[in-house]
Amino acid sequence: MTGGLSPKQKAQLIVQAAQDKKAEDVIALDVRGISSFADTFLIATGNSDRHVRSIVDGIEAALLEHGERPIGVEGREEGRWVLIDLNDAIVHVFQREAREHYGLERLWGDAPELEIGTAGPGVARSGAS
């Protein structure tokens, strides 16, 4: 189910893919030692249901290029809050109102934010220029 990306490379790839689709307020939280079900939470915001789905599609395409397949994707149809389960990483793509309502950053307030740049040469996307 998973490819050969390190957790940091996977997080960088997800952040870059989300930014490529104009996601806003993209953050990565290190939840190791806090969560029993994932190492990293990635959270992003889209402006509409269509935008959220576009961000999710971009993230999935980037991951598939590197042999990473989600265990599951929930909420795609509604497009208000889409969750991508990658086992060691959980990606949440929200519309702004849903992100503010659920406040995952507050729930996981003890988790440090990861310093994530954009995808480097080690995880360059094949379609990237």
Image: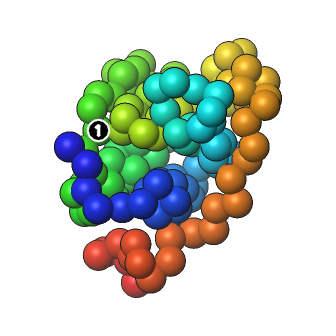
Q: Is residue 63 above or below residue 94?
A: below
Q: Nearer the viewer, residue 85 or 31?
A: 31
- Residue under label 1, please give it: 70
Can you give x and y, in whole percent of width and height, for residue 2 in the image? 25, 49
In the picture, the quarter occupied by the C terminus is bottom left
Q: Is residue 17 above or below residue 75?
A: below
Instruction: Farthest residue to the top: give it.
Output: 101
Can you give x and y, in whole percent of width and height, for residue 80 in the image? 52, 22
Point 32% across, 48% down: residue: 60
Q: Is residue 43 visible?
A: no
Counting the numbered discs, the total is 1
Point 55% across, 41% down: residue: 40
- In the image, is 1 to the left or to the right of 79? left
SS for callout 1: loop
Crowd tier of the residue under label 1, counting other residues whose Cα lies within 10 Å: few below 14, some 14–19, many 20 or above: some
In the picture, the quarter occupied by the N terminus is top left
Residue 128 falls in which quadrant of the image?
bottom left
Point 35% across, 72% down: residue: 125
- In the image, is 6 to the left or to the right of 11? left
Q: Nearer the viewer, residue 31 or 120?
A: 31
Q: Is residue 35 visible?
A: yes
Query: Which amino acid, by three-letter code, is at mark 1?
Result: Pro
- In the image, is 95 to the left or to the right of 110? left
Point 68% across, 53% down: residue: 114
Can you give x and y, in whole percent of width and height, for residue 69 in the image? 24, 45
Q: Nearer the viewer, residue 115 or 81?
A: 115
- In the image, is 92 to the left or to the right of 85? right
